[in-house]
Image: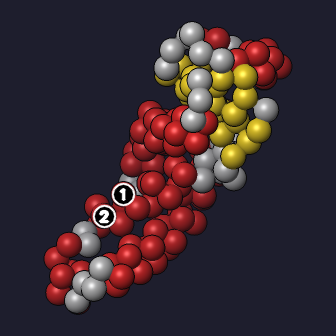
Amino acid sequence: MDTKGTFAPETRAEALEQYEEVGPVAQVVVREATKAMSFDGDEYDDRVTPEVIRTARDATFAELLAVHVGEGSEFDEWLAESEFDEDDVVRMGSENVDNVAWHPVPFADTVIAATYQEEPDAAVSTLRRNAFGRVYREEFYESGR
């Protein structure tokens, strides 16, 4: 089993704190990207809306989520030793493949899991977007972020 990423919030408060921390990073990334695209001040003001910054923040947070990657048997062993049970797992992908990527969200009693045969990086990225969309977005937007 391998782990990719750094954010593994145990609590809603930890998740919110990490989400807040990536806000300034997202703003800098958007600003630098628009400079590279030669936006002038007016174009920046017209096109870089709060939604653009929020999307950059969401994507940055999601791409930093810690995701475990391993064989199906490693996932099964991890699940058996964890605080989660099979009912807590949201599975994506085929049951007929050998590998699994997963991200536990303890404060939501959820594990998001994506199966894959090859291409672990694609599975990890898909998993992160799904974890954000299925769990974190609701937590963050519900609190007015």
Q: Name the residue under label 2.
A: 52
Q: Which residue sits at x=79%, y=32%?
A: 1
Q: Which residue lies furthest to the front in this view?
A: 118
In this picture, residue 70 sits left or right of residue 34: right
| Residue 139's disc number | none
- Residue located 46% across and 41% down the image: 129
Which disc is residue 55 wearing? 1
Q: Of all residues shown, which one is farthest toward the bottom?
A: 41
SS under mark 1: helix
Taking the image as drawn, is residue 66 in sight?
yes
Horizontally, is 123 left or right of 82 in the view? left
Q: Position of residue 136 (x, y in %)?
A: 49, 42
Measured as percent of width and height from the top left, residue 50 is found at: 29, 67
Picture quadrant of residue 32: bottom left
As measured in the structure, the alpha-carbon distance from the residue carrying label 1 to the one carrying label 2 is: 5 Å
Q: What amino acid is at disc 1? A: Thr
